[in-house]
Amino acid sequence: MDLSRRELREIRRIESRLAAENPELARRFEQWRRSRDRVAEAAALAAGRNPDQGPATRLRRLWREVLRGRIPLP
């Protein structure tokens, strides 16, 4: 789903207001963001793109091991 910049700003504004009101929602929003980032990274790796802009994550290290044949696939 592609959102416009305006829609993204509005989503962030609503999230920040809700997170300020409810700490449980703040925790859930952060979990969702981390999950979304991991999925995006896995998709980039699967598509052959190199997401090596930042420090290696556990998922990236595992994926490299699989691609190099060091971890057998079932």
Image (cartoon, grey):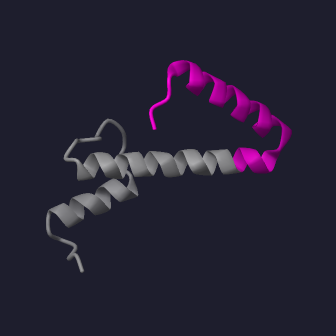
Residue appearing at x 61%, y 22% in the figure? 9
In this view, the residue farthest toward the top is: 6
Q: Residue at x 50, y 29 (%)?
A: 3
Q: In this view, does 40 lie above or below 62?
A: above
In the image: residue 42, left or right of residue 9: left
x and y percentages locating residue 31 in the rendered image? 61, 51
**Residue 39 appears in view:** yes
Q: For the C terminus, which image quadrant?
A: bottom left
The x and y percentages for residue 60 are 32, 54
Q: Is the magenta stretch mostly helix, strand or loop?
A: helix
Residue in the foreground of this view, choosing between 26 and 54: 26
Outermost residue toward the right in this view? 21
Is 62 drawn above or below residue 48 in the view shown? below
Residue 50 placement, left or right of 26: left
Magenta segment includes 3: yes
Give left or right: position of 2 versus 27.
left
Note whether residue 56 is visible: no
Q: How many marks?
A: 0
Q: What stretch is highlighted in magenta?
A: 1-27
What residue is rendered at 49% in x and 47% in y? Answer: 36
Left or right: residue 21 compared with residue 59: right
